[in-house]
Image: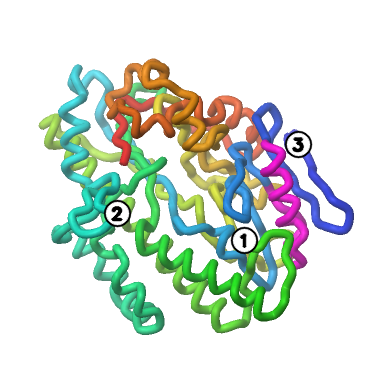
Amino acid sequence: MTTTYDVLYEKGHVPVKSWTQGVPFDEKAKQQLLNTAKLPFIHKWVAVMPDVHLGLGATIGSVIPTIGAVIPAAVGVDIGCGMMAVKTSLRANQLPDQLASLRSRIERAIPHGRSQRGGQGDQGRWGTPPKDTLTAWKPLNDTFSTMVDKYPFLKKTNNINHLGTLGSGNHFIEVCLDESDHVWVMLHSGSRGVGNRIGRYFIEQAKKDMERYFIQLPDKNLAYIPEGSSLFKEYTLSVAWAQDFARVNREVMMARALEALQQELVIPFTTEAEAVNCHHNYISKEHHFGKNVWVTRKGAVRARKGDLGIIPGSMGAKSFIVRGLGNEDSFCSCSHGAGRVMSRTKAKQLVSLDAHKKAVAGVECRIDETVIDETPSAYKPIEKVMAAQKDLVEIMHTLKQVVCVKG
């Protein structure tokens, strides 16, 4: 297998292997990765995906294998954020010529966006959770109740009223066509308000422990929790629950999106076996290079040999259903998307509404100044991102959206 990674290295620390050939790789992100590589519990090296960009403490698009500790900020606050895609039996010619009604129906079926600062009346949450949400919550409830006993503040989070909701930012629901004109439904979301609150709490607790024990770090946001501590046990249990919440959240939304599609078309259709539901912000206990390690994927997808994954482009760009090649150098991982080259603020400053309209031409989507931060030019070219990781995954399907719902 041809090697396509480069190596960053500072003497005395583990290396950083980056699959970034042919794509932008910010100098600040490089330094952030070298900071991570200085931590004493990194196993072998840090792996970097081609969608890499600056994050909080740990770089988005990084794979961090550790022994004896985890870094809460490396997992982040959108714990379990990920993708789901379902292939249908529908073909392109069975979709209506005008897709605005379908977009509106999906928007009515699934709460999205954010208003009222996330409080009562927020458009992005359920006022009264519907039956399907209540049913999906049941397997999550017992563990959540135990967590609330330990951390009472979780009771007042958006938990059940965020289950089956999209959120905002780069979260989306799309109707896509593949290379054979089959219709797919694809979506991107995570553990919503409750996952955010869990993440922020444990990041702060880790920072307090570093101060308490006078542990010096290259970046305070790399604060870690040692394995064997009571905090470690509570963190890993809470993260596992949030990851389950995120997976179920996507399942509820997917069922609702497919129902909206069915109601709009009237034509009966089936969904095929090629359904993918994968995290890209999470931790997992895995075996690599002779050791059982904690693998933190911050903006990366597991890509063991045969694993199916999803690598979305920006709104207006292609997305890919991929199969992992099991490349151990990357700890069996691949990118989680295209990766930003502009901050949200910079995109809104530099990209005009007319330019954004041209970039998303042919896609039925909301077009206004509130979504300019998600414009295609704010992201790396997805084709170059895919070329940079050709030894990590093979492309199974190429998707292009025709409908895009943004929060």
Is residue 387 rendered to the left or right of residue 337?
A: right
Is residue 364 rendered to the left or right of residue 75?
A: left
Region of the chain picked out in magenta, as a range: 26-47
Report the Cα–Cα distance between label 3 and label 2.
47 Å
* Camera-nearest label, 3 or 2: 2
Q: Are marks 2 and 1 in contact (CB under 8 Å)?
A: no
In this rendered view, identify the residue nearer to me: 121 or 278.
Answer: 121
Give residue 217's quadrant in the image: bottom right
Residue occupying the point 18% across, 44% down:
109
Report the Cα–Cα distance between label 3 and label 1.
32 Å
For the N terminus, which image quadrant?
top right
Report the Cα–Cα distance between label 2 and label 1.
26 Å
Q: Which residue is denoted by mark 3 in the rendering?
A: 3
> Tag 2 or tag 3, which sits nearer the N-term?
3
One can see residue 252 in this view: no
Q: Which residue is denoted by mark 2 in the rendering?
A: 117
Residue 221 - label = 1
In this rendered view, identify the residue nearer to me: 402 or 13.
Answer: 13
Numbered disc 2: secondary structure: helix
Numbered disc 1: secondary structure: helix
